[in-house]
Image: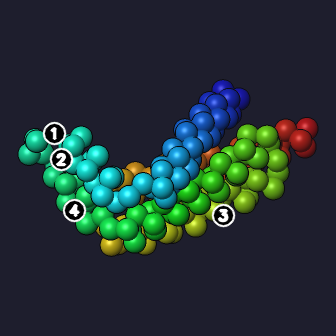
Amino acid sequence: MKKDIILHETFEISLLLKGLNATLEVILGLLLLFLSPQFISSCITSLIPNFNNFFSNYLTVWVSHFSAGSQFFVAIYLFSHGAIKLFLLTFLWMGKKWAYLTAIIFFFLFIFYQIYRYSFTHSVWLIVLTVFDAAVIYLTWVECQRIKQVKLR
């Protein structure tokens, strides 16, 4: 019984974290649609301290390869990815039955795409996001089963 409560609360926390992430994605996607690559590049370059560390070096290289085409792709990807997650998370939070399986399917699709992108970028963030998505899939499945059990009683 205590395990069920912990899993349920973890599920709700994961929805909140995923919702915050999705909101940031939508906002960043919209910003990227309306800001020029030069403006973004100059902002990031001015914010990077002159340290010789992994993070500063990574951002410097990333900014140097940031083109209008990649900006448009990232903007559309972030906006659509975030909007889909916000849509699904809203209905998960409301407890709609159809949303559980739909969310699991979409989160699996996101994982497959992230693994595909990882094969090109080798970005650690994609691995972190993929692990988090896998955990959310598990928690969504457990929550779906819990709801079925409660309704059977």
For mark 3, does the 10 Å Cα neighbourhood hold few (<14), some (14 to 19), or many (20 or more) residues?
Answer: few
Q: Point out the tag, 2 or 1, that comes first from the N-terminus.
A: 1
Q: Label 4, on which residue?
A: 64
Which amino acid lies under the numbered mark 2 shown in the image of this protein?
Ser
Which amino acid lies under the numbered mark 4 shown in the image of this protein?
Ser
Looking at the rendered structure, the secondary structure element under dot 2 is helix
Q: Are marks 2 and 1 in contact (CB under 8 Å)?
A: yes
Give me the residue at 28% from left, 54% from top.
Answer: 41
Which amino acid lies under the numbered mark 3 shown in the image of this protein?
Ile
Rounded to the nearest angstrom, the CA distance separating label 4 from label 2 is 12 Å
Q: Point out the tag, 1 or 4, that comes first from the N-terminus.
A: 1
Give me the residue at 22% from left, 48% from top.
Answer: 45
Classify residue 106 as left or right of residue 67.
right
Classify residue 96 as left or right of residue 38.
right
Q: Which mark is residue 49?
A: 1
Classify residue 56 as left or right of residue 39.
left
Q: Are marks 2 and 3 in contact (CB under 8 Å)?
A: no
Q: Position of residue 115 (x, y in %)?
A: 43, 67
Q: Label 2, on which residue?
A: 56
Q: How is the image coloured?
A: rainbow
Q: Nearer the viewer, residue 90 or 32?
A: 32
Q: Position of residue 71 (x, y in %)?
A: 40, 64
Give me the residue at 8% from left, 45% from top.
Answer: 52
Q: Point out the tag, 4 or 2, that comes first from the N-terminus.
A: 2
Q: Label 3, on which residue?
A: 105
Give me the residue at 60% from left, 36% from top.
Answer: 16
Q: Are marks 3 and 1 in contact (CB under 8 Å)?
A: no
Figure quadrant of residue 102: bottom right
Rounded to the nearest angstrom, the CA distance separating label 2 from label 3 is 36 Å
For mark 1, does the 10 Å Cα neighbourhood hold few (<14), some (14 to 19), or many (20 or more) residues?
Answer: few
For mark 4, does the 10 Å Cα neighbourhood hold few (<14), some (14 to 19), or many (20 or more) residues?
Answer: few
